[in-house]
Every structure is written in C-alpha cells, then in structure tokens.
C-alpha cells in the first residue's frame, strides 16, 4: 500500500480541535509478547501434548490452520474458536499461564497520564474484550471507553467502526485522533472515516509522516 504514503499528516493547527484520542492496543500500547506466547507457543504446545506430535511439527500444523483462516476473518481473533477447532479444551488456563508476559511499551504510562489530563482517551482495537481486559488491566483507568471492533461490532476496524465510536463518544470524526501501528487498519481506515490519524512505526523506518513512539503524539497536538 505504498501509494497511500502520499497522505499528508494533518497539521498541528487542525489538531487543536481534537477532543478524543483513540489508541490501538497491540503493538501500540501493549507489546506483542503476550499474543506471541498464546498463539505461537502455548497453543502449539497444548496441541503437541494432545496429538503426540513433536513441538516443531505441532507448530507447523497449527500455523497452517491459522493461515487457512487468515486475519481478515473474525475467527482469527477468537481464542475459543481455536481451542474448539483444535480440540484443546478450555482456553482459560492457557490465558492464565501467559498473563506474566503482558507488557507495555516504556513510554505508555507517562504518555497516558499526561494526555489524560487534557483529552478523553479511548481504545479502538480489533482484539476481543476477553483479551483486552487482561491486556489493558494496568492502564484501563486512563480510558473512558474501550472498543473492540470484533466483540462490539463483529467486524475488523472499518470506516463504519470508526464513525460508530465517534458517535458513541459524542464527537464528530474531525474531533478525534486515532493512533496505531497498522498502516491500513489504523491509519488509512480511520482517515477514510474522517478522523485525524497518526501512524506509529516503532521501527523508525518510515518518513516524517509517522511517529516512532507515543511521546511524539504531543508534538502533533500543540
Ligand atoms: Mg496494532
């Protein structure tokens, strides 16, 4: 989607009107370790135990199953679907086991505290609530609402989803800013809905149209 990089970041002047700041969760606030632990380690390990396959073969098989569904389908995000499909029993123990792996990026707490004094903060994520409630447990007091496109609207993040959450928040889209690490779902799609948007590229590989960590948000909000 490189052609989309022609978008121009909205100017700080326009950002003065922002009342609501919306954050993606995974890859934006929360590091990938918990998800990787669940999907890449724990599920293959339980599958290996159940089937008697060695862990390498079990992981290959499970990854093939993931790929056969693909991240455009809602089932991709549904842990209970996967535990049922792979006949793994209950997901609760696996989730519990991975909870110590939940972590936030270093700047997150300070940025949320600071921005929370001036803006209403929300989360807009594809991740289902059954994960979000764990992932956001230590930060949820900063957010006035947590929206899951999959749990609440049965869809991935779409322009309609972004418009709906703005409506829920009682603002027009141009009074909201969304930030996230998925170029298409966070940046392009929220802009299509009329929100201000910032693309978070923690690798720092892209140009001035992105931010590399959340401390840079404030620079765009002056
Ligand atoms: Mg993300």
Image (spheres, helix red, strand yellow):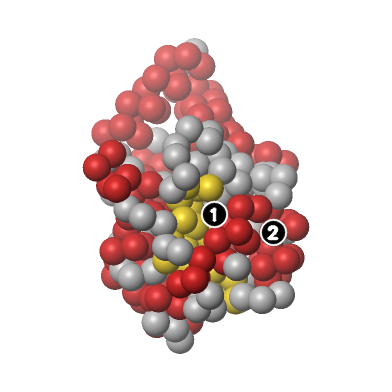
What x and y, as percent, mark residue 169? 48, 81
Residue visible at 51% across and 16% down? 55
Instruction: Please say if 208 is above or below 19.
Output: above
Left or right, residue 110 beside residue 150: right
Residue visible at 54% across and 69% down? 21
Residue visible at 45% across and 22% down? 59
Q: Quadrant of residue 64?
A: top left
Task: Looking at the picture, tell me which residue is in the foreground, 35 or 21.
Answer: 21
Instruction: Please say if 179 is above or below 26.
Output: below
Disc 1: CA contacts within 10 A as few (<14), some (14-19) or many (>=20): many
Left or right, residue 187 beside residue 99: left
How far apart, in angstroms, are the residues tagged by discs 2 and 1?
A: 14 Å
Give the number of the disc on residue 141.
none
Task: Looking at the picture, tell me which residue is in the foreground, 112 or 83.
Answer: 112
Task: Looking at the picture, tell me which residue is in the foreground, 152 or 114.
Answer: 114
Tell me the residue that label 2 is attached to.
111
What x and y, as percent, mark residue 157? 35, 59
Mark positioned earlier in the residue sequence (2 or 1): 1
Q: Quadrant of the C terminus?
A: bottom right
The reply to whether residue 121 is in sight is yes
Find out if the beta carbon at label 1 lies less than 8 Å from the nearest ligand 1 atom: yes
Tell me the residue that label 1 is attached to.
25
Direction bottom: furthest residue: 170
Disc 2: CA contacts within 10 A as few (<14), some (14-19) or many (>=20): some
The answer to the question of whether label 2 and label 1 lie on touching residues, with beta carbons closer than 8 A, is no
Q: Quadrant of the N terminus?
A: top left
Q: Secondary structure at mark 1?
A: loop
Instruction: Please say if 119 is above or below 67.
Output: below
Q: Secondary structure at mark 2?
A: helix
What x and y, as percent, mark residue 181? 47, 47
Q: Quadrant of residue 149?
A: bottom left
């Amino acid at each position: 989607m490189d052609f989309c990089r022609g978008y121009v970041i909205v100017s700080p002047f326009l950002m003065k009107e922002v009342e609501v700041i919306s954050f993606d969760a995974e890859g934006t606030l929360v590091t990938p370790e918990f998800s990787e632990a669940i999907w890449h380690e724990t599920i293959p390990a339980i599958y290996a135990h159940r089937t008697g396959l060695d862990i390498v073969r079990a992981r290959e098989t499970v990854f093939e199953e993931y790929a056969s569904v693909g991240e455009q389908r809602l089932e991709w995000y549904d842990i209970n679907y996967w535990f049922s499909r792979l006949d793994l029993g209950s997901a609760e123990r696996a989730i519990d086991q991975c909870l110590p792996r939940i972590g936030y990026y270093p700047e997150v707490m300070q940025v949320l505290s600071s921005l929370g004094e001036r803006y209403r903060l929300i989360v807009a994520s594809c991740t289902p609530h059954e994960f979000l409630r764990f992932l956001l447990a230590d930060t949820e007091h900063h957010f006035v609402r947590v929206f899951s496109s999959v749990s609440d609207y049965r869809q991935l993040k779409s322009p309609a989803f972004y418009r709906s959450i703005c409506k829920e928040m009682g603002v027009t889209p141009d009074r909201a800013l969304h930030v996230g690490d998925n170029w298409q779902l966070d940046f392009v799609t929220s802009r299509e809905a009329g929100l201000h948007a910032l693309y978070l590229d923690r690798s720092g590989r892209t140009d001035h149209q992105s931010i590399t960590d959340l401390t840079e948000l404030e620079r765009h909000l002056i």
